[in-house]
Amino acid sequence: MSRPLEIVLHVPKCAGSTLEGHLHAHLGPPVFWSAPKRTRSLPLELFGRKYRATLPAAPDTIRAVSGHYIGRSVETLFPGRQMIRSVLLREPKSLVLSWYNFRMMRYAAQGMAPYPFGLHLRCLAPDPLSHFLLSHWLEIPWLRLARMTAAEKLVRLEEALGQFDFVGDISECDQLVAALSKRLGLPEQAAKENSGHAWAGLTSWQPLRLDTLAPDDREALTARTHLDACLYARVVEGKDAPLRDASSFFDSEVRRPLAELKRRRLRGLMPRTNAPAPWPDPERPT
């Protein structure tokens, strides 16, 4: 009888690097497969499936799969296997702030310049947690996402996450590591990878917090995370939260390329340093 397959969905800034680092260190490839990006020559938004669907070994050899790019179609590569699905999520405002601080510290370590939080916000899709799950795990292409209402997206997300064996907050990382390790026969503690503390040691960047945000930025952050806040409250906190009016995905996405161009200009073209990354992940989003 085939062993169960552990599927660990890696949502950005939700301790996924710690989980992947633990699996990589103690299982190693190909027993652990971090599925790579499907292509670097075309925008991933054009595709449903975001990962390269070529297994590195026979399906029965692989015991755990993770990565930013995996979608639920990965399960079809392992016919007959029992799937154990796990994901860590994060309070939406905390996620967006962590993403900003991570970028600023990484750029500073590489000799590049910071840019304002408001620009960072405009460079992300509205409700980035929800749209990451919709586009990556559910593999919904951009054009279809642009036609869906926020209510339709919420229904799809609740249904999909309801099929996971473990959906928890980032604070439950240690519990998930212990559960994974027990099933896989690994050490039950994991070294923290790609954490803000690790990056802070490489730069003098002072992390931005919610209470230090400018009022306009705090208001914009709230407005752009209504769907995320509702989803998090429902699937992580178990609350019957109402869905408030969400930001228009289409309107935001139409404007996002201009914000990206400005971001690339402001972060500068200063020479990169050789500052090491706490977890060497060439697929990490920039």
Image (cartoon, helix red, strand yellow):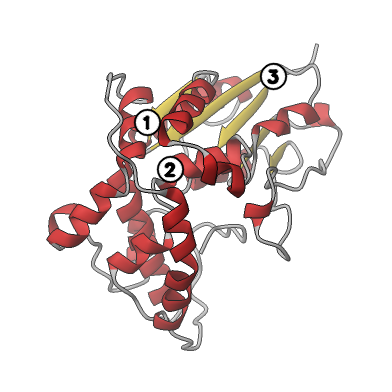
Q: Secondary structure at mark 3?
A: loop
Describe residue 187's horizontal placement relative to residue 218 as left or right: right
Mark 3 crowdedness (10 Å alpha carbons): few <14, some 14-19, many ≥20:
some
- In the drawing, what numbered circle is on residue 231? 1
**Residue type, mark 2 in image:** Leu
- The residues tagged by marks 2 and 3 sit, at their Cα atoms, a distance apart of 27 Å
Locate residue 42, reporting x and y percent: 71, 63
Q: Earlier in the sequence, mark 2 or mark 3?
A: 3
Q: Quadrant of residue 109?
A: bottom left
Could you tell me residue 280's position as x and y percent? 57, 60
User: Pointer 2 and pointer 1: residues touching (CB < 8 Å)?
Assistant: yes
- Can you identify the residue that label 3 sits on? 4
Q: Is residue 70 left or right of residue 243?
A: right
Q: SS class of the residue under badge 2?
A: helix
Q: Is residue 144 above or below residue 121?
A: above
As shown in the figure, which amino acid type bears the numbered disc 1?
Leu
Taking depth in this image into account, of 140 and 233 the one nearest to the observer is 140
In this rendering, which labeled residue sits more in front, label 2 or label 3? 2
Toward the bottom, the furthest residue is 270
Query: Is any atom of residue 249 visible in this view?
Result: yes
Along the polypeptide, which appears first: circle 2 or circle 1?
Answer: 2
Asked whether 226 or 152 is in front, the reply is 152
* Cα distance between the residues tagged 2 and 1: 9 Å
Circle 3: residue type: Pro
Q: Which residue is mark 2?
A: 129
Using the rendered image of the protein, determine whether residue 10 is visible from the camera's viewpoint.
no
Residue at (74% x, 36% y) in the render: 31
Residue 38 position in % (x across, y down): 73, 52
